[in-house]
Image: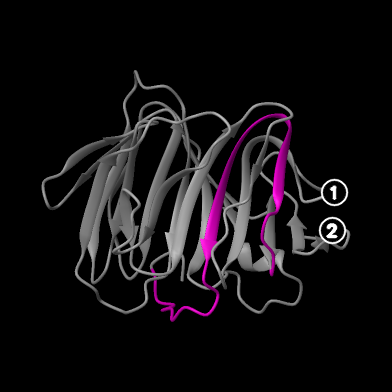
Amino acid sequence: MENTPSAKTQAQIYTAPQTDVSQNQGKFRTNFNFPGRTLPDHDDHGYGPLATVVESFMDPGTLIRMHQHRNEEIISWVPEGVMRHDDRQGNELVTDPEHLMVMNAGSGFWHAEETEAGDPPLRMLQIFVRPHSLDLEPDIQHEPIPEQTANEWRHLFGPKGGDAPLYVRNDVAFYDCRLDEDATVALPTRAGWDTYLYVFDGAVTVGEDAHVGFTESALVTDGEDVAVTATEESTIVAFCINPEAPITRQGTIGR
């Protein structure tokens, strides 16, 4: 995977192509995006507390049987289709474009995922965040999310105690946005943190000339007031990350 910095701007912008790390289990397929690999010579596939961003596909009538996660925060963002969840705590939850789910796995959480035969094909992101401490209390959050406004960022999760609808137990804040063609927004930033951008659909320009296409990504460091302009209608997500946050590396998948 080749990573290249853009032309010089106030911010440092590094882009990465579509991932080549995939798993195909027939009706369930996954593409693994590693934010740390966007930065040249970075010795960690994750970037601080953001371990990996997984593009997941489930065909109608697919069951992923009950299994356990430990020591990771798993966020299910579902812009297309529905994902049905049940767990050993008795929850039966449906995550779709109007709901977000965060599984704070902690010391251990068992769950299953399913699409029914009559459901539409599912394409989602499953986001793995490294918690700040091992064996925290397991929990699950499933909440309706604010209606989306075109060309504006929507803040969906952030560190515990913040103002986002859902929380994770480390320094990562997550935003999504639907951009009309030629529309521009400023990339979300936080003082002292960096921002990782992923294009779920469409294509954008970051800063002056960093092109980021379908399922490609960019890491923006040391910058603020960075413009993101859609070259076609696009759905994008952004993660503000504290790269100095304390992290654990014993998650079931993200590590």
Do the CB atoms of the residues marked 1 and 2 lie less than 8 Å apart? yes
Question: Residue 115's image quarter?
Answer: top left
In magenta stretch: residue 241: yes
Q: How is the image coloured?
A: one colour
User: Under tag 1, what secondary structure?
Assistant: loop
148 shown above or below 155: above
In magenta stretch: residue 22: no
Q: Is residue 101 left or right of residue 42?
A: left
The image quadrant where one finds the N terminus is bottom right
Q: Position of residue 207 (x, y in %)?
A: 77, 51
Question: Residue 62's image quarter?
Answer: top left
Q: Position of residue 72 (x, y in %)?
A: 36, 66
Q: Residue drawn at (52%, 51%), measured in percent from left and top?
A: 54
Residue 34 in sight here? no
Per the image, the residue denoted by label 1 is 209
Q: Residue drawn at (39%, 46%), measured in percent from left and top?
A: 76
Q: Is residue 129 left or right of residue 212?
A: left
Closer-to-camera residue (39/86)? 39
User: Residues in magenta?
Assistant: 222-251
43 shown above or below 159: below
Residue at far front of view: 225
